[in-house]
Image: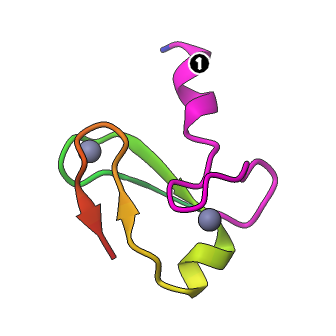
Amino acid sequence: MSDSQQQAANQCVSCGIQVAGMNAARFDCPECGTNISRCAKCRKQSNLYECPDCGFRGP
Ligand SMILES: [Zn+2]
Ligand SMILES: [Zn+2]
């Protein structure tokens, strides 16, 4: 319930840029439920994402 967690989720998990205000995809890690964001560019390139919390990798 703290704001700090939300801020951490505003970074693209693949390239690390700030995605606030961008057309970024947001989803929860299937493994641990951590909020993951990915920018439109990385989504287009189908970059793999890696959960910063549990290390889960997915398309
Ligand atoms: Zn990105
Ligand atoms: Zn995870």
Q: In x, y percent, where is residue 26? A: 52, 57
Residue at screen point 23% across, 41% down: 54
Residue at screen point 62% across, 46% down: 11
Q: Is residue 31 left or right of residue 58?
A: left
- Quarter holding the C terminus is bottom left
Q: In x, y percent, where is residue 13? A: 51, 54
For the rendered model, the colour scheme is rainbow
Residue tagged 1:
4
- Please identify the residue farthest to the bottom as the structure is shown: 45
Look at the image and give the residue range highlighted in magenta: 2-24
Where is residue 38, by image quadrant?
Answer: bottom right
Q: Nearer the viewer, residue 56 or 25?
A: 56
Q: In x, y percent, where is residue 15? A: 60, 60
- Please identify the residue farthest to the top as the structure is shown: 2
Q: How many numbered circles are shown?
A: 1
Where is residue 37, by image quadrant?
Answer: bottom right
Residue at screen point 30% across, 51% down: 29
Picture layout, residue 16 above or below residue 32? below
Picture layout, residue 52 above or below residue 58? above
Secondary structure, magenta segment, majority class? loop
Q: Is residue 48 left or right of residue 3?
A: left
Picture layout, residue 32 above or below residue 46? above
Residue at screen point 61% across, 18% down: 3
Residue type for callout 1: Ser
Q: Secondary structure beneath disc 1?
A: helix
Picture layout, residue 7 above or below residue 10? above
- Please identify the residue farthest to the left as the structure is shown: 31
Q: Which quadrant of the figure shows ligand 2?
A: top left
Q: In x, y percent, where is residue 33? A: 28, 42
Q: Is residue 17 left or right of residue 46?
A: right
Q: Nearer the viewer, residue 37 or 13?
A: 13
In the rendered image, residue 15 lying in the magenta stretch gets the answer yes
